[in-house]
Image (tube, rainbow, N blue to C red):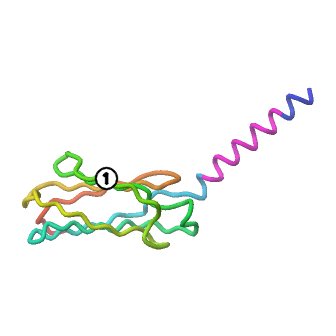
Amino acid sequence: MKSKVLAAAGFLALFLAFFAGRALADPPKNILLGFNPATHLLQVNVLHPTRNLKMHFINKVIVTVNGKEVFNQLFPGQTNRDGLKAKYNLPNVVLGNKIEVTAFCSMYGSLVRGMVAGRAK
């Protein structure tokens, strides 16, 4: 009987620890994109507020153009407590191409945002 109580208590502790971590983590809030057709430079600003930059941060960004992956970059941390900023050179992008960016939280969740090159927001 005592072993069943201890097993149940251990399971409950693991369950709470798992969901407490998720409760403290959240996916990116937004991704702001800017593409300059003259320079072919994509500016990415991932909004992801955090208090713990060592454990809870944007750890990966994937950039696709017309559905084809062109960048898959890992990050050891984000730029600051507000989020991550990155720049990507996309020399083959032409007006009308669809650009998508996916940002991943190190603890929980992801977010996808897209734009069409040369089209006003």
Left or right, residue 91 beside residue 88: left
Q: Which residue is mark 1?
A: 62
- Which residue occupies the extreme right position in the image? 2
From the top left corner, tell me how far across and down residue 19 is, in percent: 64, 48
Q: Is residue 104 above or below residue 2?
A: below
Mark 1: give few (<14), some (14-19) or many (20+) Cα within 10 Å: some
Front one among 17 and 60: 60
Residue 84 is drawn in which quadrant? bottom left
**Principal SS element in the magenta part?**
helix
Left or right, residue 102 beside residue 107: left
Q: Is residue 20 magenta?
A: yes
* Identity of the residue drawn at 42% across and 54% down: 104
* Identity of the residue drawn at 51% across and 58% down: 26
From the top left corner, tell me how far across and down residue 71 is, in percent: 26, 53
Left or right, residue 68 beside residue 92: right
* Identity of the residue drawn at 7% across and 61% down: 95
- In the picture, the quarter occupied by the C terminus is bottom left
Q: Which residues are magenta?
A: 7-21
From the top left corner, tell me how far across and down residue 99 is, in percent: 20, 56
Residue 43 is drawn in which quadrant? bottom left
Q: Amino acid at mark 1?
A: Ile
* Identity of the residue drawn at 41% across and 59% down: 75
